[in-house]
Amino acid sequence: VSKSCFGEDTAVLLEKMGREVGSKCWMQEWHRLYGLPEERQTRRRRNILKMPSSPTDSLLACNLRGLKLLTDENEMNYDVVDNWLKNLNDTELGEQLLEKSASCKKLQVPIPNLPIDDEISPLIKGVLEFRTYMNCMNAEGTKVCRERE
């Protein structure tokens, strides 16, 4: 949907940005967990760029901060998404998605029932805020794009 809606160039650019940040963060996580220098990794090195299915909180936070979607205070940075939407070549599409963004920002983050440790709660709250917003934007953005096809 993103290629047909935003154009192939934009979709490829977003994918490339995500891949670059992801591999940088995964290398940091690898060094933090295993401490092996890159030149000693040989055959294993090929597999480390595959993000695990359940990434650690620090890996997820690194990726979100690298994309500037999570602030240093562990809060969702909505301005990054809104600025990107404002700069879309298709201004009508950008305006429609900005409306969806405004409604998605208002969603309540589902945290009251989670047993959250005070020490890690800001990060978990930030990640949940990101997921809540992005799940909404993915659903609403897909609807907007399909209506335009």
Image (cartoon, grey):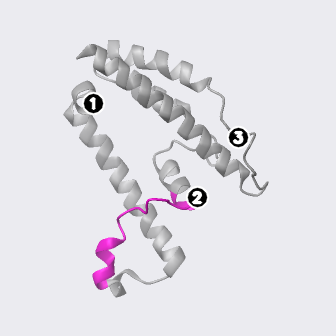
Question: Which callout, 2 or 1, points at the residue further toward the start of the chain?
Answer: 1
Identify the residue under disc 3.
111
| Quadrant of the rendering where the N terminus is positioned | top left
64 in relation to 51, above or below: above
Q: Residues within 10 Å of mark 1 (few under 14, many from 20)?
A: few
Q: Is residue 49 visible?
A: yes
Residue 50 lies within the magenta run: yes
Residue 64 is labelled as none
Q: Is residue 71 left or right of residue 40?
A: right
Front one among 67 and 104: 104
Identify the residue under disc 1.
1
Residue displayed at 35% across by 18% down: 144
Q: Give the range drawn in magenta.
A: 42-59
Three-letter residue code for mark 1: Val
Q: Is mark 2 on a helix, strand or loop?
A: helix
Residue displayed at 30% across by 14% down: 147
Three-letter residue code for mark 2: Asp
Q: Residues within 10 Å of mark 2 (few under 14, many from 20)?
A: few
Q: Can residue 76 be seen in this view?
A: no
Q: Quadrant of residue 52?
A: bottom left
| Quadrant of the rendering where the C terminus is positioned | top left
From the top left corner, tell me how far across and down residue 12 is, in percent: 24, 41
From the top left corner, tell me how far across and down residue 37 is, in percent: 42, 83
Front one among 11 and 72: 11
109 in relation to 141, above or below: below
Q: How crowded is mark 3: few (under 14 residues within 10 Å), some or many (20 or more)?
A: few
Residue that sits furthest to the right in the current view: 118
Residue that sits furthest to the bottom in the current view: 40
Question: Which callout, 3 or 1, points at the residue further toward the start of the chain?
Answer: 1
Identify the residue under disc 2.
57
Q: Nearer the viewer, mark 3 or mark 2?
A: 3
Q: In this view, does 136 lie to the left or right of 75?
A: left
